[in-house]
């Protein structure tokens, strides 16, 4: 499969992010309840979804490493998890800002998604500690892969646990009957979501290219 | 016991491997008495610390929550010691080379740790009732279910931590984020009136993570 060239991806991210910002700040209407501040929702939710996707991709690559012994899969899994953590931190930041504006506190334990991302942040921060505590080689690849797989089981289990432990305060934007908004709000959300996804994929490719170059350089130096 | 067919033979052999390995760990503890006395002293000391860290007039619910902190940290003590004999005597490689399924090593170690933890709790739970008067039947059920998950996941990350450079430092970092759902389930079972949901959740956690650990353990010990 041919990969999209990096310059194309970078240009697409720039255009999409600009378009998303324009739509979110100038086109989408103010929320009747929360006013202007609700606009952070477009980024908060998009970033959260992207972070989940990165963790999922990391686990998928980890599975490919363990299953098919795909030589690039270990590095790809690591880079995906790394991107996931970066976007996860952004979720914590945007969520905190939103919580401060909506409820007056920077941190509220009743915010399920926020608590879940805190647990995930701790979990994936330990992933890096683990990875950098083992010498590069097949053992490090195996341990990282297994730990990344634990992550995809931990996400639904923690979600269930946190949901069990408290009542839901988070606004339910997506219900079983589809998203409960329409028009420009939906358009702005979709564009923001696509923009953040393309941006994440571009960053992933840039980091992966750098890491592959590192590996190649080390091989040449040893040769 | 051994019936016709290679499948039955394999099953019996697997169980006898697990039995032999568990017996080995229990025998080692019986002779050296390294872990269990330390766990008992630790949990008693922790209860005393909790008594003084809870302000006078704190609710019994607070003490129930602290019981779970004590259990998780006491378990960490046992988990930190779990693979120490293998590391000191350098016998992990020999175990891996032995003609048995690698998951048997994990299962046996989990069973041995479970035995230590259960033995510590047989003393710790009555002690908790003596000091704080808040032990309920559902708490005991929650502890029993959570023990399974703690030992399954803890032994797995214990085996992971032991092959890294950071070792003891890494174990709590790897284990605690994974134990958060167990604490949520356990505390829920201890404090609410209808603990069924929480006990069910603990059972689900045990099942999911035990399966994952069982399937993935080979990758931790084999390069």
Image (cartoon, helix red, strand yellow):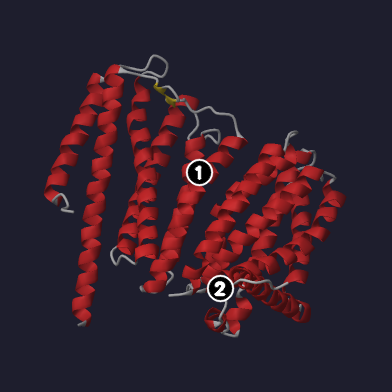
Query: Which residue is rendered at x = 50% and y = 43% of the image?
Result: A156
Q: Residue A175 at x, y = what percent?
A: 45, 25
Residue A96 seen in this snapshot: yes
Q: Which residue lies furthest to the right in this view?
A: B130
Q: Please give the chain letter of the residue carrying mark 2.
A: B
Q: Which of marks 1 and 2 is in front?
A: 2
Q: Residue B18 at x, y = what percent?
A: 66, 72
Residue B183 seen in this snapshot: no
Q: Do the residues labelled 1 and 2 touch (CB within 8 Å)?
A: no
Residue A77 lies in what quarter of the image?
Answer: bottom left
Determine crowd level at label 1: few under 14, some 14-19, many 20+ residues with C-alpha closer than 10 A. Answer: few
Q: Name the secondary structure under disc 1.
A: helix
Answer above or below: position of A11 versus B8: above
Mark drawn on residue B101: 2
Q: Please give the chain letter of the residue carrying mark 1.
A: A
Distance from disc 1 to disc 2, alpha carbons, whole Å, reads 30 Å
What residue is disc 1 on?
A156
Residue B5 lies in what quarter of the image?
Answer: bottom right
Give the position of the N terminus of chain B as an image quadrant: bottom right
Determine crowd level at label 2: few under 14, some 14-19, many 20+ residues with C-alpha closer than 10 A. Answer: some
Q: Residue B97 at x, y = what percent?
A: 52, 82
């Amino acid at each position: 499969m041919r990969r999209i060239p990096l310059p194309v991806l970078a240009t697409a991210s720039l255009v999409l992010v600009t378009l998303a910002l324009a739509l979110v700040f100038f086109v989408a209407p103010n929320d009747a309840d929360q006013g202007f501040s609700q606009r952070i929702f477009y980024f908060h939710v998009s970033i959260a979804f992207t972070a989940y996707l990165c963790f999922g991709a990391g686990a998928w690559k980890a599975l490919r490493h363990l299953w098919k012994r795909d030589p690039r899969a270990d590095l790809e899994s690591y880079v995906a998890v790394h991107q996931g953590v970066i976007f996860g931190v952004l979720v914590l930041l945007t969520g905190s800002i939103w919580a401060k504006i909506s409820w007056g506190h920077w941190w509220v334990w009743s915010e399920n998604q926020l608590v879940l991302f805190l647990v995930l942040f701790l979990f994936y921060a330990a992933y890096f500690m683990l990875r950098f505590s083992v010498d590069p080689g097949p053992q490090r690849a195996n341990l990282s892969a297994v730990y990344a797989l634990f992550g995809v089981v931990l996400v639904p289990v923690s979600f269930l646990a946190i949901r069990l432990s408290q009542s839901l305060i988070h606004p339910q934007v997506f219900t079983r009957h589809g998203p409960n908004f329409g028009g420009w709000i939906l358009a702005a959300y979709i564009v923001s979501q696509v923009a953040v996804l393309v941006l994440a994929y571009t960053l992933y490719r840039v980091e992966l290219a750098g890491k592959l170059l590192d590996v190649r350089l080390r091989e040449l130096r040893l040769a | 016991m051994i019936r016709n067919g290679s499948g039955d033979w394999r099953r019996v052999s697997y169980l006898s491997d697990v039995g032999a390995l568990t017996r080995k760990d229990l025998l080692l503890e019986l002779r050296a008495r390294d872990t269990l006395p330390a766990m008992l002293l630790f949990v008693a000391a922790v209860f005393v610390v909790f008594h003084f860290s809870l302000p006078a007039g704190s609710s019994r619910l607070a003490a129930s929550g602290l019981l779970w902190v004590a259990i998780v940290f006491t378990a960490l003590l046992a988990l930190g010691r779990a693979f120490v004999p293998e590391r000191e005597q350098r016998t992990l490689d020999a175990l891996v080379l032995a003609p048995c399924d690698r998951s048997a090593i994990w299962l046996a170690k989990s069973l041995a740790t479970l035995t230590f933890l259960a033995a510590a709790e047989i003393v710790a739970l009555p002690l908790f009732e003596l000091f704080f008067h808040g032990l309920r039947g559902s708490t005991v059920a929650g502890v029993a279910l959570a023990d399974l998950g703690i030992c399954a996941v803890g032994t797995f990350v214990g085996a992971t931590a032991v092959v890294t450079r950071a070792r003891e430092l890494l174990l709590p970092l790897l284990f605690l984020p994974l134990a958060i759902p167990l604490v949520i389930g356990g505390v829920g079972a201890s404090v609410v009136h209808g603990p069924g949901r929480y006990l069910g959740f603990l059972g689900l956690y045990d099942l999911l993570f035990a399966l994952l650990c069982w399937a993935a353990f080979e990758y931790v010990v084999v390069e």
